[in-house]
Image (cartoon, rainbow, N blue to C red):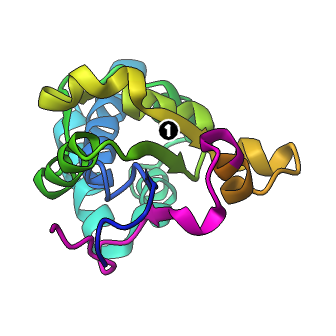
Amino acid sequence: MKLDRSVYMFEIDDILIPKRDYLLQVYYLFANFVEYTEGRECSKELLKYLTAAFESRGEEAVIPAALEHFQLENSYLENFERLRTNAHLPLKLFLREETKSIMLSLFAAGKGVGILTDGNPVEQLNKLKHIDWQELGEYLPLLKVYFIKELSFRKLDPVGFIAQDYQVSPHDILIVNDFGKQIVMD
């Protein structure tokens, strides 16, 4: 596809940043939290387990499996969810190079660029807060952020709402949420 649209909306997870980078830092923080709370040295072993479980079983299975494996109370699940949503990460998140390059080209071409993201709005906003925007930093005032869950809750069609906000037709919007659909640079 060519740069023939007026507005380009990017997902955060695995498009702007690798979601894995965020989760691994949250697992690190969680492992240290458990060690501190339990009063026993277990953070390294727990982090190793969390990482391996994520790689082999996927994101949804990680915490329940870890709670069972380390014989931790189910109350830790709530602690994990709170940490995942509001974590103050020890390291910055870095944009995918391909995404950064595309976004720079779009801004240079005068295109509308924004973020349309699914998931917990508080967590997604937290991810944005921890991104090192590098060369894109100067364009941040132009970057609009939309949350699918928030728009759906308000019974608004996300694409229709964005089209109205940018004053374009819905057909002039491209949502980039899968790198299988590459944007071809002219």
Estimate the x, y position of residue 134 in percent, counting from the top left: 13, 28
At 88% from the left and 51% from the top, the residue drawn is 155
Q: Amino acid at mark 1?
A: Gln
Q: In terms of depth relative to the viewer, which is nearer, 70 or 163?
A: 163
Estimate the x, y position of residue 93 in percent, counting from the top left: 22, 35
Name, please, the residue furthest toward the right. Answer: 155
User: Any magenta on residue 56?
Assistant: no
Residue carrying label 1: 124
Q: For this view, does 12 lie left or right of residue 139?
A: right
At 37% from the left and 67% from the top, the residue drawn is 4
Q: Which residues make up the magenta segment?
A: 164-186
Q: In the picture shown, does residue 66 fall above or below 150?
A: below
At 38% from the left and 53% from the top, the residue drawn is 13
Q: In the picture shown, does residue 64 fall above or below 31?
A: below
Q: For this view, does 158 lie left or right of residue 123?
A: right
Crowding around mark 1 (Cα neighbors within 10 Å: few <14, some 14 to 19, many 20+) is some
Estimate the x, y position of residue 59 in percent, counting from the top left: 42, 62
Q: For this view, does 114 lie left or right of residue 182?
A: right
Q: In terms of depth relative to the viewer, which is nearer, 71 or 148?
A: 148
Q: Secondary structure at mark 1?
A: helix
User: Any magenta on residue 184?
Assistant: yes
At 43% from the left and 65% from the top, the residue drawn is 177
